[in-house]
């Protein structure tokens, strides 16, 4: 289950990072390029996002254009 952001908002610019955590008692090992534990679905907007409402417009949207999920780009 994705732990933090449930969707990618209109206006987002930057890498898409899958943040997952194993809270179970068993160890699960994922193999790069073989196991693909995610899915990306696209939803069509019924109307354009109003100017100034897209992600990255408010000052609080601090992750816009972030290069790495653990780096503080400030």
Image (cartoon, grey):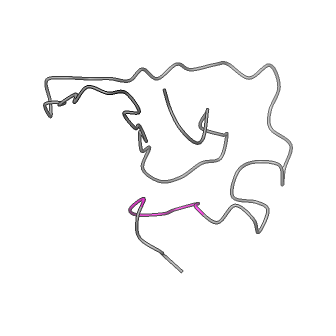
Residue, x 48% and y 26% (percent of image)? Answer: 1
Residue 14's place in the image compared with 68, above or below, is above
Q: Could you say where residue 34 lies in the image, as x and y percent from the top left?
A: 13, 23
Residue 38's place in the image compared with 71, above or below, is above
Task: Report whether 8 appears left or right of 57.
Answer: left
In the rendered image, the quadrant that contains the C terminus is bottom right
Q: Is residue 66 magenta?
A: yes
Task: Report whether 34 appears left or right of 41.
Answer: left
Residue, x 26% and y 25% (percent of image)? Answer: 26
Residue, x 41% and y 39% (percent of image)? Answer: 18
Outermost bottom residue:
74
Task: Report whether 70 appears left or right of 45.
Answer: left
The stretch of residues the image draws in magenta is 63-69
Task: Report whether 45 appears left or right of 52.
Answer: left
Residue, x 64% and y 19% (percent of image)? Answer: 43
Q: Could you say where residue 23 lies in the image, as x and y percent from the top left?
A: 41, 33
Q: Which SS type dominates the magenta stretch?
A: loop
Q: Could you say where residue 66 lies in the image, as x and y percent from the top left?
A: 48, 63
Q: Is residue 74 magenta?
A: no
- Specify the quadrant of the image occupied by residue 38: top left
Give the number of callouts. Answer: 0
Q: Could you say where residue 55 lies in the image, as x and y percent from the top left?
A: 70, 51
- Specify the quadrant of the image occupied by residue 48: top right
């Amino acid at each position: 289950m994705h732990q933090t952001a449930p969707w990618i908002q209109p206006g987002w610019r930057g890498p898409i990072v899958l943040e997952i955590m194993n809270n179970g008692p068993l160890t699960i090992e994922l193999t790069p390029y073989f196991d693909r534990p995610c899915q990306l679905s696209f939803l069509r907007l019924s109307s354009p996002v109003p100017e100034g409402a897209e992600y990255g417009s408010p000052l609080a949207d601090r992750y816009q254009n972030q290069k790495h999920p653990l780096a503080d780009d400030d």
